[in-house]
Structure formats: C-alpha cells, structure tokens
C-alpha cells in the first residue's frame, strides 16, 4: 500500500510572523520626512504640510500674490516664492546640452585675407604693359600676349598665364602673396608691368546655415570649418564661441544663433505601482507646465494612486544643500480648483505619485503568501491523488474476490 507522509505546517507561527512584518502597513502608510522649504525644514504627511515658513511668509496664509486669491484657506506654510499656477516664473537662461538642435546662420561668408588659395580656384588676373600685339598676327597669338581674364589654378598648384609668360606657383598661398609672385615672374619678361590679382568670388566655399545637432561630446559640427564645443553655454556664450572659431576661416563673421529643438530639459512623473514596481514618464519641459499639466500628460492618476500622497521632489542646485519636497493637494487642485499647490514644473523635477497603502499591503502580502499557497496546493493535490489510488486499489481487490 502506497503511503505518503504529509508534513504539517505551523500555520499559526507563519500568520504571526506575517502580521508582525506588515504591522506598519496595517497601521497606516503615512511617510514622514524632513523637507527643506525656503531655507527651513517642514514635515510632509498624507494630510498636508506643517512646519515653519520662510522669511516673508505668514503661518497658515499663502498670500494673495502667491495663491491668486486672498484667504484661500491653504495652511501649507511653504515659501510664497515657490512658482505656481497663478504666479509662474521665467526659467533661467537656457544652457545648451546634447541633444539640442541649434539653428546657426552666418550672415557674412567673406573669406579672410590670410586664407590660402587652393588648387581649382579661379583668379582674376589683369596686367598692363604686356607684350605688344601685331594686328597681322593671328587672333590666338594676340590673346596669348594679353593677360586679362580668369585663370584656374591647376592641380599641380600652378596658374598658367599662356605660352608667352609661363606658369606661376600659387597654390597654398594667400592672395597678397600670389600677386607678389605674379609680379616677380612678369618682371623677368616685361618692363614695369602693372599687375592686379583678385578673386572673382570672394565668399567661402561652404555656407554655414541651417540646423546643427549638438553631439554627445558637447560639440556642434560646422562642416569643413571643424567643430565647436558649446555644451553648458548660454546662447550668447555659444554665439561668441562660434564667431571666434569661424574668424579663422571668414572675415569678421556674424552669426545668428537660436535653438530649434529643446531636447535636453525634462521633468519626470513617477507612479508607484503599489508594490509592483514604479513607472517613470519623461516629459519635455517647456517652461509653462504645472502639476495638473504633468498629470494630464500621463493620462491622469493611476488606479492604485493615493491622492493624499503626491509631491514634487526638486533637486537642490548644490550638492551640499538638501532637496526640496513640495506636497500636492490633488483633491484641492482637481475638485476645488485651488492653485496653492498647483506648482510650476521646473527642469529636473520628480512628481511622485504614491500608491494606496491597502493596495501596497495586498501586493506585498500576496508575495509573502504565494509560496504557502503553492505548498498547500501541491499538498492537497498529492493527498487527493493518494486517495484516488487507494480507492482504485480497494475496488479492484473486491472485484477480484468475486471471481
């Protein structure tokens, strides 16, 4: 006979340990933390904010300028300088970071006097007092004795002035040096020639115009003119740096700079999943969003959200200073149209939506009891299988005895 010994599980001890583990959740999920507000520390709880005010604020009163209406009833005690729906602030001067897109327009593309003349470029050369031409000579012979036209620098670096005057090495030299070389060469053939060498097209080969992406290394490419590091700079600083870089390739460059794509400044909406992880949504910051706008970007509060535990975590500008936490009264914003806690979202803010404590408790308790459920399930299944086998064996014996 098949016999299976089923171990007895001390369920009372297991239940007692579970109760002790989740006792804080059963008593409430209110989290308390020290919050710096306007240079002072306050305490954030699920029911609101309490504590001291910054200089210029009155305990239990937001102020008509801060809330938009006098006596709104908000007993927060936050500093009135915190930007909110009816008292927004302009963001500080924008700092360029990857992967922003810059619109760069160079208004002046004249090449500088020191720019070298390269092979393949045209030169306008005009010379007076050249060799006299006889009217009886062929037209081609007369043209060979005249130097007045556009001459292309060959791939060998020489400019060919015709069979009567020969070649002059010009590649890689600035315009002033090219004219000096042509004069020196013609003085060997002509008597006191008058030479003028100019560029038919004095502009640069490549225009600097259009959108330019800021690379991950913080530089922006300018084509054949190289790249410029602009990360962390304001638009004024970046404009000066680009003009300084282009001054080596252009004559007195003037650059118009604007930002075509603001791709580096974000704020985050973090929703607690009630023990099942957290979801993070990154939203571009345009400088005008409030808490209500941020929640609308994520299609509202999740079903497990606790409306009494929503706050903004704002990083401090310096590492040695504490971060700022601003409690959000969601019911007041959504149901009462209150603007006291409808704060303006700034770049880098974290809007945290805490999950309901009962949902969190249920999820955590399910994680703890899941192994027990599996063990009991296997136990019950094994017990049922043994009984079925025993009943089947007994019925077969009775039938066999009857034969």
Image (cartoon, rainbow, N blue to C red):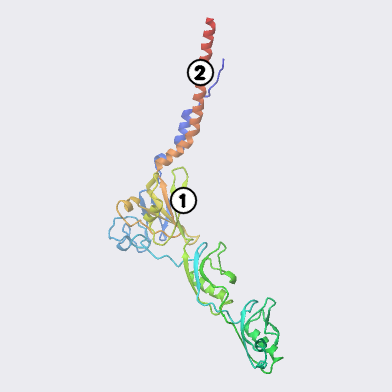
In which quarter of the view is residue 314 placed?
Answer: bottom left
Residue drawn at 54 percent across, 77 percent down? 109
Q: Is residue 221 left or right of residue 51?
A: right
Provide residue 397's location: percent of width, then percent of height.
54, 9
Compared to residue 290, the image places residue 230 above or below, namely below
Res. 280 mark: 1
The reply to whether residue 226 is visible in this rendering is no
The residue lying toward the viewer, choosing from 138 and 372, is: 138
Provide residue 280's location: percent of width, then percent of height.
46, 50
Compared to residue 369, the image places residue 197 above or below, namely below
Q: Is residue 325 left or right of residue 218?
A: left
Is disc 1 placed on a helix, strand or loop? strand
- Residue at label 2? 388
Image quadrant containing the N terminus: top right
Is disc 2 placed on a helix, strand or loop? helix
Q: CA distance from mark 1 to mark 2?
A: 52 Å
Compared to residue 318, the image places residue 117 above or below, namely below
Count the numbered circles shown.
2
The residue lying toward the viewer, choosing from 306 and 227, is: 227
The reply to whether residue 360 is visible in this rendering is yes
Provide residue 402's location: percent of width, then percent of height.
52, 5
Q: Residues within 10 Å of mark 2 (few under 14, many from 20)?
A: few
The residue lying toward the viewer, choosing from 242 and 62, is: 242
């Amino acid at each position: 006979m098949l016999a299976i010994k089923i171990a007895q599980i001390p369920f009372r001890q297991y239940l007692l340990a579970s109760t002790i583990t989740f006792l804080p959740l059963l008593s409430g999920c209110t989290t308390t933390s020290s919050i710096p507000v306007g240079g002072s520390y306050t305490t954030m709880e699920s029911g609101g904010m309490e504590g001291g005010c910054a200089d210029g604020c009155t305990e239990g009163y937001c102020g008509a300028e801060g809330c938009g209406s006098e006596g709104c009833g908000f007993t927060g005690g936050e500093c009135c300088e915190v930007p909110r729906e009816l008292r927004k602030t302009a963001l500080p001067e924008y700092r360029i970071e990857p992967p922003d897109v810059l619109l760069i327009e160079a208004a002046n593309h004249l090449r500088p006097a020191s720019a070298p003349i390269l092979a393949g470029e045209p030169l306008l050369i005009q010379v007076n007092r050249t060799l006299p031409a006889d009217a009886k000579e062929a037209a081609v012979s007369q043209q060979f004795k005249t130097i007045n036209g556009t001459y292309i620098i060959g791939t060998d670096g020489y400019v060919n002035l015709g069979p009567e005057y020969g070649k002059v090495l010009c590649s890689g030299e600035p315009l002033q040096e090219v004219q000096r070389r042509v004069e020196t060469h013609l003085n060997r053939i002509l008597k006191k020639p008058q030479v003028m060498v100019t560029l038919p097209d004095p502009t640069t080969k490549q225009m600097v115009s259009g959108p330019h992406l800021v690379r991950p290394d913080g530089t922006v490419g300018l084509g054949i003119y190289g790249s410029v590091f602009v990360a962390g700079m304001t638009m004024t600083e970046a404009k000066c740096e680009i003009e300084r870089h282009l001054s080596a390739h252009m004559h007195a460059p003037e650059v118009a700079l604007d930002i075509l794509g603001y791709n580096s400044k974000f704020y985050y909406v973090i929703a607690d999943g009630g023990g099942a992880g957290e979801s993070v949504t990154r939203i571009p910051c345009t400088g005008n969003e409030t808490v209500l706008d941020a929640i609308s970007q994520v299609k509202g509060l999740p079903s497990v959200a606790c409306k009494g535990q929503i706050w903004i975590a704002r990083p401090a500008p310096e590492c040695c200073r504490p971060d700022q936490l601003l409690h959000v009264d969601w019911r007041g914003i959504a149901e009462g149209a209150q603007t006291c806690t409808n704060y303006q979202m700034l770049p880098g803010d974290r809007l945290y939506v805490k999950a309901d404590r009962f949902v969190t408790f249920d999820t955590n308790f399910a994680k703890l009891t899941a192994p027990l459920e599996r063990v009991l399930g296997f136990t019950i299944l094994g017990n049922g299988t043994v009984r079925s086998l025993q009943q089947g064996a007994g019925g077969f014996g009775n039938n066999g005895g009857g034969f």
